[in-house]
Image (cartoon, rainbow, N blue to C red):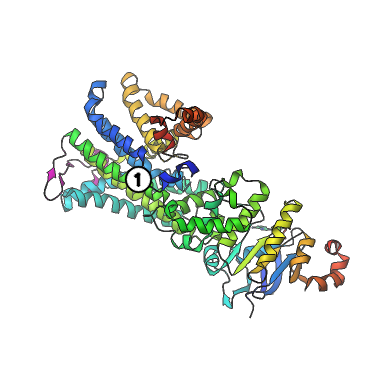
Amino acid sequence: MSMLEAAGVHVRFGDRVVLESVDLAVAEGEFHGVMGPNGAGKTTFFNVLTGRVKPSRGKIRLGGEDVTGLSPHRIANKGIARSFQIMTLFDEFSARDNVMMGLPEFRARGLDIARAAAGDRRFAEQASDALAAVGLADKGDVRAKDLSYGDRRALEIAVALAQAPRVLCLDEPTSGLGSDGVQRLATLVARLKGKLTIVAIEHDMEFLFSLADRISVIHWGQVVARGTPHELQQNEWVRRSNLGKFA
Amino acid sequence: MIVGSNSSSDAARLVTPTMLVLWLVLATVPLWITRIGLYPYLGIEILIWSLYALAFNLVLGRAGLPSFGHGAYFGIGAYSFGLCQLDIVANLWICLAAAAVVAGLAGVLVAMFISHRRGIYYAFMTIAFGQIFWTLAIKSHRITGGEDGLLKIKRLPADFGLVSFDLTDNVAFYYFVLAVFAVGVAALWRLVHSPYGRVVAAIRQSEVRAAHLGYNVWLYKASVFALSAAVSGFAGGLFAMAQLAAFPDVMSLHQSGYVVMMTLVGGGLVSFWGPVIGVFLFLTARDVIGALTNAWMLYFGLLFIAIVLFRPEGIAGALSAAMQRHSLNALRRRGTSAMRLLVGGGR
Ligand SMILES: Nc1ncnc2c1ncn2[C@@H]1O[C@H](COP(=O)(O)OP(=O)(O)OP(=O)(O)O)[C@@H](O)[C@H]1O
Ligand SMILES: [Mg+2]
């Protein structure tokens, strides 16, 4: 059974059809890459997976359970975490507090008005672990808005990891990162591979082709090609399009 | 309420050094206030409006939700206190609880309609509901006394079983309000620094992100509004006691604007104490400048404009910026000045 499954997802904004019919099945522990030209609807597809956009047709299943059309917070509680293409960190919070917001234990305490949030050591420790995992161990007290671009990207991932998700959706995680940053991210993802189900939209073909188990290419509102990196490199369509050149 | 690293230890406290200093200073007020030409009643007003403004700031400063009709809940609290006392039971505790509960319920009702909104739409809806409540208060002459107000409200004794305190005297009532204020401040401080308070602050920064992290944004927005309404109503109940009456004018759009002004001028967007600073300035200016000229609002309005233009983070923000500039010197001297306690410790 697939961990995450999308079937016939159709999305229109007004009379503009963005996704015609997208199918996707991601196995548990798989790293699945998503690529496609600008404006192909990749982010929109993530928005459907995470409840931000309700599809007009089609189904999303998580671990076999139908989660189509649930609100974002419900879907997050069921175990889909996401990073954002355009970063939306809690800028006034420290890096540690940003991560803390992602912890399921903290979320469960969200309605607690009688205890001091800062008083709980466990939260701080778990948050520090997630920060260390992305190389931000010594930046826990820095306010998110004072972090460098690369560190902010890393923080996004730390928050997503802190959620202990069943499926992690990354929207262009390498975008804007220097080669060091990409390398750091690649190492992290390689470490997570097999343990976590990951779907990643990515324009960096080297990154994707070296790490992904399988890749789907979204174009004209549907998946036009799919396979292992090796299969895709042989794919006629991919070879002819721009996308193949990077591979 | 920037969650700065320097305030993290205070954030975990129930009572901070700043609070102790403030309460001690406030406790001396009746000893000298008449000597500077003012009177204890002003102190009562400042404390009650401070509690109200702190409650209001949960919504404006903490959650970042522009509520411009908050006077409604303050007023509903005042009427509820009065009606409870006149028609149900003349018990201080029950009537104060009634003020909070009824205002809180009104807050829940309104929150159900507005909590999926934000920004200008949110602001408009709060104004609309505020106007509805204000109109109801004026038109329901048989219940509220209309524009004449609900009169003959008494300062019920504070009955603790073994001892009972008479509050008819302004100084006695001042100390009662101060005690309530102290408890209220500690409770709000804890609320703001609880997990709940942190989620609310996160929602202010990004509703979208909070939702994708699994937080039910609607529930948090609705509940913080209702909580704020309940505490505002509680303060309104105290205000009815202070005035010995309840009037519709505190519910008007005009007076709802006062609490917004007080909170912004004081610096409620950046500091827990901002609303208190703002209320103190506003009411003192009303009495001091108001004694010299009827146009005191003109001067306060000018101050408001100047602050919005030059110091959008308000007085508390300006003070803490000044403090940070001097903190190096202060560190050298290893002094813990009262200023640091009041501003730095209070952030
Ligand atoms: N809420 C919306 N309302 C209307 N149109 C939208 C909305 N969201 C996305 N679109 C449109 O849908 C199309 C697909 O956008 P989307 O962001 O999903 O593309 P993408 O594949 O992620 O592109 P990129 O590679 O640039 O990130 C775009 O033309 C965009 O303008
Ligand atoms: Mg995109």
- Specify the amino acid type for callout 1: Ala
Can residue B243 be seen here? The reply is no
* Location of residue A77 with respect to B102 vertically, above or below: below
Front one among B300 and A127:
A127
* Location of residue B231 with respect to B347 vertically, above or below: below
Disc 1: host chain? B
Question: Number of labelled discs?
Answer: 1
Secondary structure of the magenta portion, mostly? Answer: loop
Residue A139 location (% of width, % of height): 59, 48
Front one among B23 and B172:
B23
Specify whether B55 is left or right of B247: right
Question: Would you say the beta carbon of the disc 1 residue lies within 8 angstroms of ligand 1?
Answer: no
Q: Residue at x 79, y 70 (%)?
A: A229
Q: Quadrant of ligand 2?
A: bottom right
- For the C terminus of chain B, the quadrant is top left
Residue B173 location, quadrant: top left
Q: Residue at x 26, y 45 (%)?
A: B237
Q: Residues within 10 Å of mark 1 (few under 14, many from 20)?
A: many
Label 1 belongs to which residue?
A: B72
Residue A161 location (% of width, % of height): 59, 62
Q: Residue at x 25, y 52 (%)?
A: B98
Specify whether A153 is left or right of B279: right
Residue A199 location (% of width, % of height): 67, 67
Element assignment for label 1: helix
Residue B167: in magenta span: yes
Front one among B21 and A138:
A138
Residue B327: in magenta span: no
Look at the image and give the residue range highlighted in magenta. Answer: B141-168
